[in-house]
Structure formats: structure tokens, C-alpha cells
Image (cartoon, helix red, strand yellow):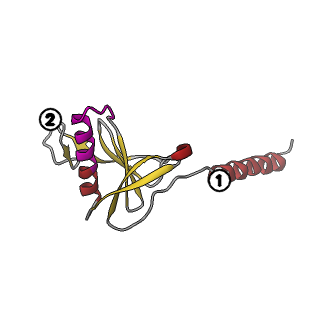
Amino acid sequence: MTRTALTLALTAATLVAATLSACAKRTEPPGTVGVCYHVGAGKAGALKYNKLVQAPNLETCAANLEAMRVKFLRMGGTTQELLGAYQANFIFIQSQGVFTSTTLEGPRYLALVRTGDGRLAIPGAMPQQ
């Protein structure tokens, strides 16, 4: 195989891979301004968006989702992680903290961390020992 043919074959393979990755399913949340949603599983595995509160920012929405999680635990629930949505961002309430992502399948970014007593704080707000 000549060098030109090899280069063309590699270019074609790269284009095919890029095209297929662009077609991957991406689940995006609603972009309603100021509305905090709790996201649950609906019929046939579809996501159901339940309006929780009006919130001025993502941190307030995350705090309301955390309060909901704690109330359910106090009533005897066992769910440790919650999924929410706020202004075209998914919010993941987890034991390590609160993470956010623009798609359900995409990378998650740290938004809030847990303090030693379990409360939520902005990263960097807690003094390091």
C-alpha cells in the first residue's frame, strides 16, 4: 500500500469514527429559566421532570434537592443519590458532593463538596488542614 493510500484510509477511518460519535444519544434537560426539577424514571424508562421549586441559581436548586433527599431518608427511604435539573444542566446529588453536566451521558463537574459533617459547600470555601 502506498503512503497516499494509507493516509486516505486513515483519514476515512477518522471521519467515520467522528461521524458515529456525533450520532451518540445525548439526553438533555429542559432549559426553563429558574425552575428546579427532580428527575425520576417514568414509564418505559423515560425521564420524568417534576417541578420542585423556583430557584435563583444552581446552588439553591441543589440545596433543595439535598433537603428532599434528607427528608426521604428520615421517612425511611433508602435512596442515597438523586438526579435533578436546572436551566439546561443535570444535577447529580451524590455522597461525594454535587456534580453537574449538560447531558446525562456527558462528563460531570464538581459544583459543591461535602464538609466533614455532611453539609454542602462551594469547593475551596473550607480551609485545608
Residue that numbered label 1 is attached to: 23
Locate residue 94, reporting x and y percent.
Answer: 32, 39
Relative to 116, say whether 111 is above or below.
Answer: below
Q: Nearer the viewer, residue 78 or 112?
A: 78
Residue 127 vs residue 21: left or right?
left
- Disc ID at residue 111: none
Residue under the image location 21 percent in, 35 percent down:
74
Q: Nearer the viewer, residue 31 or 42?
A: 42
Q: Nearer the viewer, residue 119 or 35?
A: 35
> What whole-number distance in Å separates the C-alpha atoms at marks 2 and 1?
43 Å
- Graded by Cα atoms within 10 Å as few (under 14), some (14 to 19) or many (20 or more), the crowding at tag 2 reads few
Q: Residue furthest right?
A: 1
Residue 27 vs residue 62: left or right?
right
Residue that numbered label 2 is attached to: 117
Question: Callout 2: helix, strand or loop?
Answer: loop
Relative to 81, say whether 110 is above or below.
Answer: below
Locate residue 88, reporting x and y percent.
Answer: 42, 60
Is 47 inside the magenta-drawn segment? no
- Graded by Cα atoms within 10 Å as few (under 14), some (14 to 19) or many (20 or more), the crowding at tag 1 reads few
Q: Hey, what amino acid is under mark 2?
A: Asp
Q: Hey, what amino acid is under mark 1?
A: Cys
Chief secondary structure of the magenta span? helix
Residue 87 vs residue 119: left or right?
right
Locate residue 102, reporting x and y percent.
Answer: 44, 55
* Span colored in magenta: 65-79
Residue under the image location 48 percent in, 49 percent down:
47
Relative to 88, say whether 113 is above or below.
Answer: above
Q: Earlier in the sequence, mark 2 or mark 1?
A: 1
Residue 84 vs residue 72: left or right?
right
Is 73 inside the magenta-drawn segment? yes
Question: Callout 1: helix, strand or loop?
Answer: loop
